[in-house]
Image (cartoon, rainbow, N blue to C red):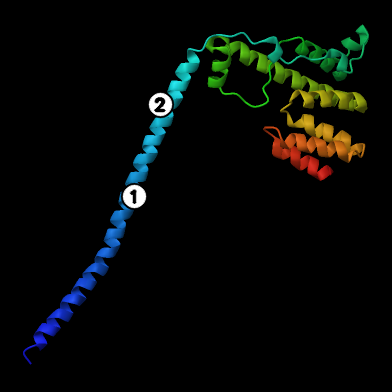
Amino acid sequence: MGMMPLILGGDFADVLVRNVAIGLTPILLLALLVTIMIRLAKRKSHEKLQRTADMLEENDEANNARARDVEDELLFHVIMEDLPLREYTAEEQEKPRPVCMWQNKVIQAASKKMLHFDSPKTNVELKKMFGRANLEFVARYEENFVNFIHAMRHWAEALLTEDKKDDAQQVLEIAVEAGSEVSQTYTLLADIYAEANDSEKLTALKDLAESRSLPGKAIVLSHIEKLL
């Protein structure tokens, strides 16, 4: 009879310890989770600060890059003989005829210095390549290229309006080969290929569009897939 209280006391202590442990487990897990989150937040903050520092350092380096002229070999040149240019009389040119007007705009655009990169360049990359002082010229040359491509697209549309599909195809193919990023350049050309039942050229055009960084790539691919 004298041992019973000790046994009961031992069982009670064990139960108490287990209950306390069970009660502490969620608290310990929460504390561990909070600790991990704090460490992750500190790591992300450090990485963000490091990226910002790296970007500032890279930008400073770019700002101090030596100025270099845009070499002629980097410029985009139009082979005028490849364009389906037509001679128009003075009377035809005076009339509000889109095909004549856009041909003239293409000729004017082609006479300017143009620059186009296969992949987009950041300002930092451009400053490293040509120097900060030449950034304005680079931007102007890139804008000239965009204007040329838009003029080519409008010219092709005007040619199609006059049922000159061969000429329109030639214009659009030159624009695509030049690296056009205008979705209509591809969709109009795809329509011409589809009307001619040329699935081989349609497929090739689709593959080319997939390989390029086009703002309207999804629209272009969807349009071509429907034609195929």
Q: Could you tell me the amino acid type at mark 1?
A: Ile
- Report which quarter residue 11 is drawn in: bottom left
Picture residue at 89% right of the left edge, 18% below the top: 84
Picture residue at 77% right of the left edge, 13% below the top: 110
Left or right of 138 in this view: 55: left
Left or right of 17 in this view: 124: right
Question: Can see residue 175?
Answer: yes
Q: Could you tell me the amino acid type at mark 2?
A: Ala
Which quadrant is home to the N terminus?
A: bottom left
- Report which quarter residue 99 is drawn in: top right
Rendering coords of residue 50 (x, y %): 40, 31
- How packed mark 1 is, by other alpha carbons closer than 10 Å (few <14, some 14-19, many 20 or more), is few
Task: From this view, report whether residue 51 is shown above or below residue 152.
Answer: below
Q: Earlier in the sequence, mark 1 or mark 2?
A: 1
Is residue 207 or residue 151 the one in the foreground? Answer: 207
Q: Which residue is mark 2?
A: 53
The local secondary structure at tag 2 comes to helix
Q: Which residue is mark 1?
A: 36
* Callouts 1 and 2 close, C-beta under 8 Å: no
Is residue 221 or residue 116 the one in the foreground? Answer: 116
Task: From this view, report whether residue 197 is shown above or below residue 61.
Answer: below
Question: Can see residue 97?
Answer: no
- Report which quarter residue 182 is drawn in: top right
The local secondary structure at tag 1 comes to helix
Rendering coords of residue 211 (x, y %): 71, 35
